[in-house]
Structure formats: C-alpha cells, structure tokens
C-alpha cells in the first residue's frame, strides 16, 4: 500500500452528493424551542441547573437555527 500516488495514477474525485439540509436544521431548531419551553415551564429543572444559562443556551440554539435556515434559503434562491 502506498500513501502517495502520482496525479496520473489517481482516480478523479467523485462529485459531491446532493443534499437538502433544511429539514435537519428545522428539526434541530424545533428541538431547541421544545428545550426552551421545558426550561421555562418545568419547575424542578431550575433547581438542578442554572435556569438562566439553560434559557440563554436554548435561545442561542434557536437563533442559530433561524440564521442557518435563512442562509440555506438564500443559497437556494434562483439567480
């Protein structure tokens, strides 16, 4: 087995697969919204974890998901 091949011996790189990343990003954003609701409305959760940090983390997760969806929709629009 050789670690290096000459350029003439290499096979061409395969094309990148076509994927639709909107669905997993939307599911992740919904999961952060559910976690945010749990952080606000489950009374025992505030005792176990610092509730402020948990709420801020959930809000950042939702915000990043919305930014990601916006970016993906911007990339997919016709030019």
Image: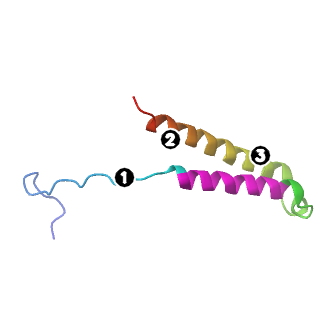
* Span highlighted in magenta in the image: 23-39
Residue identifier under label 3 = 56
The reply to whether residue 23 is visible in this rendering is yes
Mark whose residue sits in front, 3 or 1: 1
Residue 27 is a magenta residue = yes
Q: Where is residue 73 in the image (x, y as percent from the top left)?
A: 51, 39
Q: Residue 18 carries which label?
A: 1
Relative to 59, residue 37 above or below: below
Secondary structure at badge 1 equals: loop
Q: 10 Å neighbourhood of mark 3: few (<14), some, or many (≥20)? A: few
**Closer to the camera in the image, 25 or 2:** 25
Residues under numbered marks 2 and 1 in contact, where contact means CB atoms less than 8 Å apart = no
Q: In percent of the image, x 70 and y 44: which residue is there?
A: 60
**Closer to the camera in the image, 1 or 53:** 53
Residue identifier under label 2 = 72
Mark 3–mark 1 Cα distance, whole angstroms, equals 34 Å
Secondary structure at badge 2 equals: helix
Q: Position of residue 20 (x, y in %)?
A: 46, 51
């Amino acid at each position: 087995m050789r670690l290096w091949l000459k350029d003439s011996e290499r096979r061409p790189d395969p094309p990148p697969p076509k994927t639709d990343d909107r669905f997993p990003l939307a599911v992740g954003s919904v999961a952060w919204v559910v976690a945010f609701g749990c952080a606000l409305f489950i009374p025992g959760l505030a005792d176990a974890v610092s509730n402020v940090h948990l709420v801020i983390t959930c809000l950042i997760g939702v915000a990043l998901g919305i930014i990601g969806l916006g970016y993906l929709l911007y990339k997919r629009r016709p030019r």
